Amino acid sequence: MAKKKQTKAPDEMSFLDHLEELRWHLIRSVAAVVVIGCVAFVMREFIFDTIIFGPKKMSFPTYRFFCNIATSLGFDSAFCADKLPFTIQSRTMGGQFSAHIWTSIWAGFIISFPYVLWEMWKFISPGLHDNERKNSKGFILIASFLFFLGVLFGYYVVAPLSINFLGTYQVSEEVLNEFDIGSYISGVRTSVIACGILFELPIIIFFLTKVGLVTPEIMKKYRKIALVIVLILAAVITPPDVTSQIIVAIPVIVLYQISIYISQFVLKREAKKEAKLAMQRTKKS
């Protein structure tokens, strides 16, 4: 009977062994995205009519929310309109089919993100020390939570505000807004994915601080510059009113401040470890 192949320890694996291990993690990650993407492909009506084209309808929760606020304050608002003044078209032979395929793939990636993250963590974690693995418990849960929180923020805040502004913007009444389906979906997708990644800022800062590339002092030094950049981005992707810009900017500013606290926490913990090791060396000597 053939003996079962034993898994090598990380320190015994060659470069090619690591590549082989990475290849299987990537294969399983891609397989998860494809499987969920196939499910999304079958659920075409829900994915497109309910989710993708949801921000195009004035019955969308975000529009109702802003409309109710404006009405309660006695103001007129574009969010209270009956419908958005633009249409979506497909100007290429395979435009709709291509949009169907790629939207399903991106939906598969978003939904399977925790599993993809878990596969990558399984590849990286054997190279960490025991205390580092212990201190990193909950990494996948926290990172997944932040990602989905960012996705929801992008879908319910950034995407509808952008669509409402760009869909109603006209340089002249002679020009009609007739958007290609690829352009519309790209706008929604970019808002959702970008916010999902942006909300991973605390996790990114945690690891950058661990390797010494970022410190709280650096983040505090450039906080004003970061604030200006955030406000500029908020002004670009939202309608030209202060309220919408503040709503978009606040979560990013909060994340930036949280990242500063995380960086401080990491440095304090590293300092305690070094002090503990120094005491142990002193006792031994």
Image: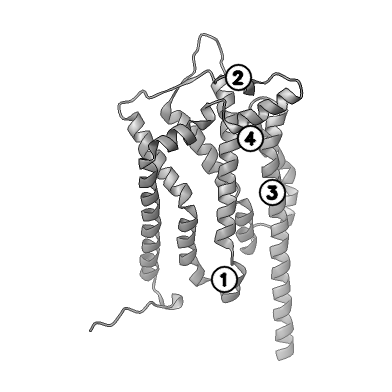
Depth check: give the residue in front, 8 or 142: 142
Residue drawn at (55%, 42%) of the image = 194
Q: Which residue is mark 3?
A: 256
Residue occupied by mark 1: 133
Dot 4 surroundings within 10 Å: few (below 14), some, or many (20 or more)?
some
Residue where numbered disc 2 is placed: 81
**Helix, strand, or loop for circle 3?**
helix
The quarter holding residue 41 reads top left
Mark 4 = which residue?
233
How many residues crowd around disc 3 within 10 Å: few (fewer than 14), some, or many (20 or more)? many
Q: Residues within 10 Å of mark 1 (few under 14, many from 20)?
A: some
- On-image quarter of the C terminus: bottom right
In the image, residue 121 above or below residue 152? below
Label 1 SS: helix
Which amino acid does the dot numbered 2 rest on?
A: Ala
* Residue 283 place in picture, x, y as percent: 74, 89
Disc 4 element: helix
- Identity, as a three-letter code, of the amino acid under mark 1: Arg
- The nearer-to-camera label among 2 and 4 is 2
Splitting the image into 4 quarters, where does residue 91 fall? top left
Q: Is residue 87 visible?
A: yes
Disc 3 marks which amino acid? Tyr
Could you classify mark 2 by the number of other residues whose Cα lies within 10 Å: few (under 14), some (14-19), or many (20 or more)? some
Spatial CA distance of label 1 from label 4 is 37 Å
Q: Nearer the viewer, mark 1 or mark 4?
A: 1
Front residue (pair 256, 2): 2
First-in-chain label (2 vs 3): 2
Nearer-N-terminus badge (1/4):
1
Give how far apart the Cα atoms at labels 3 and 4 are: 15 Å
Residue furthest out toward the bottom:
285
Between circles 2 and 3, the one closer to the viewer is: 2
Horizontal side of 208 relative to 99 (left or right) equals right
